[in-house]
Image (spheres, helix red, strand yellow):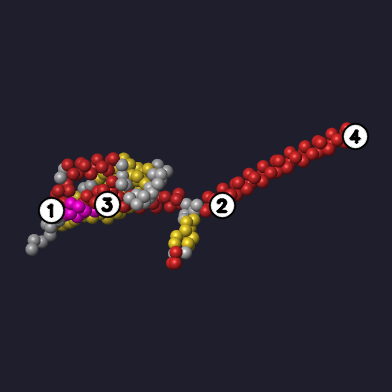
């Protein structure tokens, strides 16, 4: 009887120990899960210094929520840089340098092609001012494909030319943002589909 009583106590102690161990594992797992959620939520908040160097909490939205808007902004900025030019070689160089941060070698190829054809020299010699007005951007976000629709204005001393502009390309997400590429997006396989004269207005000679 004594032996059976000891065996029962040992068995009971084993069950209690095993149950305590499983309960501890469950509590640890739940605590780790909620800690992970708190850390993930904290990463969506940043602190900025306000008046008197006091830290102020600023909420940051999930990047994926506004990604489409960032894609469109990046596309519009690239086209503005590439197609908005003045008869100033330093300004043209600056615009092209900034634009190249947003596009892969397909953009560099188009730039080199225009340079070889004397396009930029013609801007300088004719004192032309080029500007771009965006009409719309078609964006297929799952494929990361876009098509840009706009109108280019070429204002020369003797005339003003309005040209249609349609380009297409794809988008690639980069690992990190930077001052030169704040949206961390790279335009790839970029090409011009249409760039034709729509209207020419002659200016009266003085």
Circle 3 residue: 81
User: For the residues marked 1 and 4, what is the alpha-carbon distance in whole angstroms?
Assistant: 112 Å
Write down the residue under mark 2.
Answer: 38
Structural distance between the alpha carbons of marks 3 and 1:
20 Å
Q: State the separation of the CA atoms marked 3 and 4.
A: 92 Å
Circle on res. 2: 4
Q: Which residue is mark 1?
A: 126
| Dot in front, 1 or 4 | 4
Which residue is at 88% across, 36% downward?
5
Number of other residues with Cα within 10 Å of mark 2, as a class: few under 14, some 14 to 19, many 20 or more: few
Between circles 2 and 3, the one closer to the viewer is 2
Element under label 2?
Answer: helix
The residue carrying pointer 1 sits among few (fewer than 14), some (14 to 19) or many (20 or more) residues within 10 Å by Cα, namely: few
Residue 153 placement (x, y as % from top left): 21, 55
Question: Gap between marks 4 and 2, in whole Å?
Answer: 54 Å
Q: Earlier in the sequence, mark 3 or mark 1?
A: 3
SS category of the residue bearing label 1: helix
Residue at image coords 45%, 60%:
48
Q: Is residue 13 left or right of residue 61?
A: right
Tell me which label, 4 or 2, sits earlier in the chain.
Answer: 4
Bounds of the magenta segment? 83-91
Q: Nearer the viewer, residue 103 or 33?
A: 33
Q: Which mark is residue 116?
A: none
Q: Nearer the viewer, mark 3 or mark 4?
A: 4
- Which of the two labelled residues, at mark 2 and mark 1, occupies the earlier sequence position? 2
Compared with 114, 77 (above or below) is below
């Amino acid at each position: 009887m004594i032996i059976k009583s000891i065996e029962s106590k040992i068995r009971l102690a084993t069950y209690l120990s095993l149950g305590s161990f499983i309960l501890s594992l469950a509590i640890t797992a739940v605590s780790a899960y909620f800690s992970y959620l708190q850390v993930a939520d904290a990463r969506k908040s940043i602190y900025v210094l306000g008046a008197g160097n006091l830290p102020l909490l600023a909420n940051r939205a999930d990047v994926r929520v506004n990604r489409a808007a960032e894609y469109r902004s990046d596309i519009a900025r690239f086209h503005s840089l590439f197609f908005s030019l003045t008869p100033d070689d330093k300004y043209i160089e600056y615009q092209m340098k900034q634009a190249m941060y947003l596009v892969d070698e397909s953009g560099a190829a188009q730039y080199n092609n225009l340079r070889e054809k004397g396009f930029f020299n013609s801007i300088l010699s004719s004192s032309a001012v080029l500007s771009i007005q965006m009409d719309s951007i078609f964006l297929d976000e799952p494929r990361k494909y876009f098509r840009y629709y706009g109108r280019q204005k070429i204002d020369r001393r003797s005339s003003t030319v309005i040209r249609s502009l349609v380009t297409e390309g794809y988008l690639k997400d980069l690992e990190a943002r930077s001052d030169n590429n704040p949206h961390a997006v790279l335009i790839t396989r970029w090409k011009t589909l249409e760039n034709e004269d729509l209207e020419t207005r002659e200016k009266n000679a003085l």
